[in-house]
Image (tube, rainbow, N blue to C red):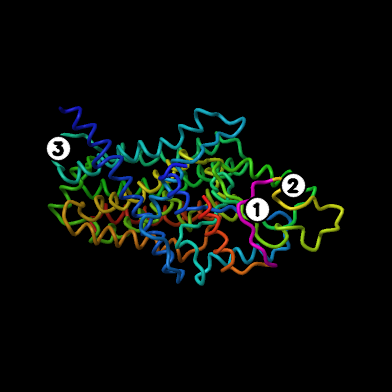
Amino acid sequence: MGNAKLWGLKKSPWVFHVAAASCNNCDIEILDLITPRWDVERFGIVLVGSPRHADALLVTGVLNRKNLPRVLRVYEQTPKPCLVIGIGSCTCHTHMFESSYNVVGPYDKYLPVDVYIPGCPPKPEAMILGIVKALKRL
Amino acid sequence: MNIVKILFQYVVFPGFIFTGVVGLFLTWIDRKVTARIHWRVGPKWFQPYADFLKLLLKETIVPEGSSKTLFLLAPLFGIISMSIFAVMLFSMNFNPTTTFIGDLIVIVYLLALPAIGIVLGGSASKNVLAGVGASREMTQYLAYELPFLIAIATIILKAGGSIKFGEIILAQQAGGPFLYSISGVITAVVILLTIQAKLSYVPFDIPEAEQEIMAGPYIEYSGVALALYKLGRAMMLFLLPLFLISLLWGGFADWWAIPKFLLIIVLIVLIKNTNPRLRIDQALKFFWLGLGVLSIIGLVFAYYGL
């Protein structure tokens, strides 16, 4: 990637939140990131409402047969380059839903996931660390 | 030589590049003040430039089934009209006696073009939410244009029936700014709230209501096209307060214009951060029954010379 492109991407990663059948704990912890205590807008991170505007997808929840095509569709709709950040233990493996008939497995079978942030739900500090690691990998 | 000079005026100073750079800086002021009101730290000063650069270098997706030409041309409406508007505004303020015929009617049309660009882009993108946003933008345009036009008529009346921008500024330099009178204050309030709606800031951000219809007309835009929309909005944030200063507060050809300008920007950001969003029917009622009546009262005051 070119230097200017990389700098722009690192300084203003806009994130889109893909809630793929999560239990809402991770989603609420994500919203903590934009409160005064953590304030990730300092680093240019903004939550956007449309995948077309996004540079990073925050995926939460376990992948199942119903939402797999939808998650893939959202990924296809996002302009590239885009990061995929898995938030919560559900995305790393299948967590407590391992033996469920409906679960189709972890995300990296289907998507190029850049970083996993384990935890149920992960702390906001852990999410910031994960995003920093993902941006360093670029 | 003349053509080079004119091109320089439209493209570099005070047209496209100057207005764009200053406008992006003003969006940083907006975000920083918003953050401080929320008791947050807020982004660094280069944030809007980083956003703009990133969007320029990203992939631009044209959605399947949309009207491709219109979809990609729509963001240019706002930028082109704002560049022309910047040149008119600066030349009228710094040499009000030139023969350049810049009248208020042209400016009213130029200020309508960004809204038309948003409506066309939203309708061209073949997305339900973008369609809803475009229809709301159209309704809101009809709503705020009525008090805005009456306010413009008040200013024309106060300038002694002249629709030329330069003569309005000369009249203020001769007889003091129009703001220092009852009708002037009423007109300033009306134009300030209209600016809020033209910028689609809260409480009038109905077309792009984030919690209801995501990003409204911009929902399908990505990459360069989205960057151009953002730039057009930033240019409006720079030019509309200057327009208010030159119509009512004696022009901006002296250093006093800078504190006046910052005061108006901070007022806009404060209104943005202390109000909830209206519904589209409430906005229409507010503009037609509230501000419409208020601006007519201002017109009557101006007729009796108050």
Q: Chain of mark 3?
A: B
Range shown magenta: A111-120
Q: CA distance from mark 1 to mark 3?
A: 57 Å
Prevailing SS of the magenta stretch = loop
Tags 2 and 3 on a common chain: no
Q: Are marks 1 and 3 in contact (CB under 8 Å)?
A: no
Label 1 is placed on what type of residue?
Val
Across and down, in percent, residue B20 comes to: 33, 45
The disc placed on residue A68 is: 2
Tags 1 and 2 on a common chain: yes
- Examine the rendered structure and indicate whether residue B254 appears above or below residue A128: above
Q: CA distance from mark 1 to mark 2?
A: 12 Å
Q: Which residue is mark 3?
A: B98
Q: Nearer the viewer, residue B183 or B236?
A: B236
Q: Is residue A113 magenta?
A: yes
Q: Which residue is mark 1?
A: A18
The disc placed on residue B50 is: none
Across and down, in percent, residue B255 comes to: 17, 57
Across and down, in percent, residue B145 comes to: 42, 45
Q: Nearer the viewer, residue A54 or B180?
A: A54
Q: Nearer the viewer, residue B62 or B270?
A: B62
Looking at the rendered structure, the secondary structure element under dot 2 is: helix
- Examine the rendered structure and indicate whether residue B37 appears above or below residue B285: below
Label 2 is placed on what type of residue?
Leu
Q: CA distance from mark 2 to mark 3?
A: 65 Å
